[in-house]
């Protein structure tokens, strides 16, 4: 069994600092329950001194989760902060106070306006005070990524001697790169006396897009706690993404030599819950939890995945709570992908019919970004409707507008291959098309019903038209047609209905007929 890396989830604290991501207590409780199901080790529930709402959230989460996880409350190295955090954690079964101070020159001079020695004294005092309330104290050295390393090590050593059980090395501004951050973590083990007595934690931000890489570099250098958020949310460009580090460690356990105890099958559910509550949409190309993370639209990739999933997927989507790989049908999809999807939908088409559907699919795919299952069902229906045609709709052209007279020109091809063209005008484009078709077909009928619906979502949806015509003897025939252009779909539907009417008029052949 690999050595464990602890997952410290700060979605409810640092994640909530994303602009627009503020959550009320009920929402925080809902996410906290899901984080317990996910199996994180620590939930940083809030910053109690910041507001009554944050205080109540920390109190209620600590009260509810019991022994399941450590519940952590943030404070500055200020006595009142620490006392309020302790009050909020009073009923928690496994409480942790997370206190600390800035250690970079920027923070010391420009924000705190104190010397390094004063910062060190405040750090020690904060840890000692926190230890009076709880046995588990985490110390953070804010902006450690830009701190002078030897000063950082002095502060960390002093914090451990004061009673810190966890020491957090944050790259607060996302400034470092992996080799640099890994070396900073490695330096703790070389320069800090007593470092073995504390858990070394990493807390990275994504300002340069390296939060996950830096956190993993820290683990490789010896850190055994990662502070992260669901979907990587957080102030500015966000925090280390929980789903990314968990799956990176799981996929490359041999390389890192460590793993987590997170239940990865709850990752997708947790991601969607956080996205719904915060209103922060996950980008489609987001690793692990993005809509496109396990989707394939390239024909080459689709062919490979259908033959063997691992050719283009290093993670089984089932392992993170996704139903499976997604084959997205577009103009770049190959025959293999189309045939596979049709079979999944229950269509086992003979070769000649598949070729007709494939040709129609390519024509539709050139007009749409994505072809959906509902589109395919319609295309198969369209193919079946053309098998016994008396007249085939070859093309239709129409003009319409205000002012102007709606006109239409239609070309039909007979079963014998004769091309017939005629034109007409009407009260609208559909009426003009139907009158032009009637001039060619010349079969008496009455249009008794006309309906149109979008087959799929989006402005480029395939439209399906259903009509009913009544023959002279009172029989009703239904016609259907589908196309991205509703007028063309209407022409297909009318031609289909008339074909059914004409086929029904064929003489019945019996033994008594003498034929």
Image: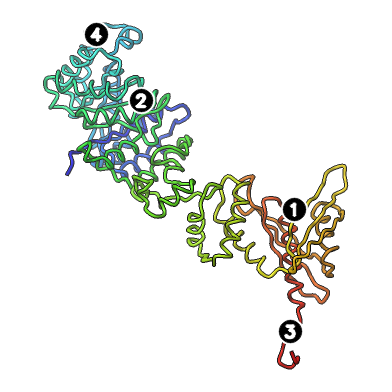
- Nearer mark to the viewer, of 2 and 1: 1
Q: How far apart are the two marked residues, 3 and 2, measured between alpha carbons?
A: 79 Å
Labelled pair 2, 4 in contact (Cβ < 8 Å): no
Residue in the picture at 87% in, 53% down: 425
Describe residue 399's horizontal placement relative to residue 147 as left or right: right
Describe residue 411's horizontal placement relative to residue 53 as left or right: right
- What is the x, y in percent for residue 439? 86, 63
Q: How far apart are the two marked residues, 4 and 3, measured between alpha carbons?
A: 103 Å
Residue in the picture at 83% in, 74% down: 472
Which tag, 1 or 4, sits closer to the chain's start?
Answer: 4
Residue 205, numbered circle: 2
- Nearer mark to the viewer, of 2 and 4: 2
Which tag, 2 or 1, sits closer to the chain's start?
Answer: 2
- Nearer mark to the viewer, of 3 and 2: 3
Residue 508, numbered circle: 3
Which tag, 1 or 3, sits closer to the chain's start?
Answer: 1
- What is the x, y in percent for residue 303? 44, 52
Mark count? 4
Q: How far apart are the two marked residues, 1 and 3, measured between alpha carbons?
A: 35 Å
Residue 168: image quadrant is top left
Secondary structure at badge 1 equals helix
Mark 2 nearby-residue class (10 Å; few <14, some 14–19, many ≥20): many
Residue 116, numbered circle: 4
Secondary structure at badge 2 equals loop
Which of the image's four quarters has the C terminus?
bottom right
Mark 1 sits on what residue? 487
Secondary structure at badge 3 equals loop
Labelled pair 1, 4 in contact (Cβ < 8 Å): no
Mark 3 nearby-residue class (10 Å; few <14, some 14–19, many ≥20): few
């Amino acid at each position: 069994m690999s050595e464990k890396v602890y997952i410290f989830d700060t979605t409810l604290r640092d994640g909530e600092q994303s602009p627009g991501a503020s959550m009320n207590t009920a929402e925080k409780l809902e996410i906290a329950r899901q984080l317990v199901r996910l199996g994180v080790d620590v939930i940083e529930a809030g910053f109690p001194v910041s507001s009554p709402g944050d205080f109540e959230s920390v109190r209620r989460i600590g009260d509810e989760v019991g022994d399941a996880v450590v519940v952590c409350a943030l404070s500055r190295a200020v006595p009142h902060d620490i006392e309020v955090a302790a009050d909020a954690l009073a009923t928690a079964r496994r409480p942790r106070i997370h206190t600390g101070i800035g250690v970079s020159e920027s923070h010391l001079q420009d924000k705190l306006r104190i010397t390094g020695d004063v910062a060190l004294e405040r750090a020690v005092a904060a840890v000692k005070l926190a230890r009076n309330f709880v046995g588990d104290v985490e110390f953070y050295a804010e902006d450690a990524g830009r701190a002078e390393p030897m000063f950082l090590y002095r502060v960390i050593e002093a914090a451990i001697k004061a009673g810190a059980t966890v020491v957090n090395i944050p790259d607060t501004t996302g400034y470092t790169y992996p080799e640099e951050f890994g070396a900073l973590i490695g330096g703790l083990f070389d320069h800090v006396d007593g470092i073995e007595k504390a858990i070394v934690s990493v807390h990275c931000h994504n300002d340069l897009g390296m939060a996950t890489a830096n956190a993993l570099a820290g683990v490789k250098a010896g850190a055994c706690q990662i502070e992260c958020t669901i979907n990587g949310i957080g102030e500015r460009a966000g925090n280390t993404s929980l789903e990314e580090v968990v799956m990176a460690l799981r996929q490359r356990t041999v390389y890192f030599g460590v793993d987590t105890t997170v239940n990865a099958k709850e990752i997708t559910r947790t991601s969607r819950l956080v996205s719904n509550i915060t209103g922060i949409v996950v980008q489609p190309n987001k690793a692990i939890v993005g809509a496109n993370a396990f989707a394939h639209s390239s024909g080459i990739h689709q062919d490979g995945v259908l033959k063997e999933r691992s050719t283009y997927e290093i993670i089984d989507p089932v392992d993170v709570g996704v139903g499976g790989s997604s084959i997205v049908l577009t103009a770049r999809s190959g025959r293999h992908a189309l045939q596979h999807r049709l079979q999944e939908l229950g269509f086992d088409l003979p070769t000649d019919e598949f070729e007709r559907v494939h040709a129609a699919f390519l024509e539709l795919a050139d007009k749409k970004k994505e072809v959906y299952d509902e589109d395919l069902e319609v295309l198969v229906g369209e193919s079946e409707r053309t098998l016994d045609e008396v007249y085939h709709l070859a093309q239709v052209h129409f003009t319409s507008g205000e002012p102007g007279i709606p006109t239409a020109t239609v070309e039909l091809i007979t079963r014998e291959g004769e091309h017939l063209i005629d034109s007409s005008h009407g009260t609208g484009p559909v009426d003009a098309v139907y009158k032009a078709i009637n001039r060619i077909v010349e079969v008496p009928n009455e249009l008794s019903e006309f309906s149109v619906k979008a087959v799929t979502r989006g402005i480029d949806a395939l439209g399906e038209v259903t009509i009913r015509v009544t023959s002279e003897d009172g029989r009703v025939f239904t016609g259907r047609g589908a196309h991205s252009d509703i007028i063309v779909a209407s022409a297909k539907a009318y031609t289909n209905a008339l074909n059914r009417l004409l086929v029904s008029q064929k003489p019945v052949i019996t033994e008594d007929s003498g034929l």
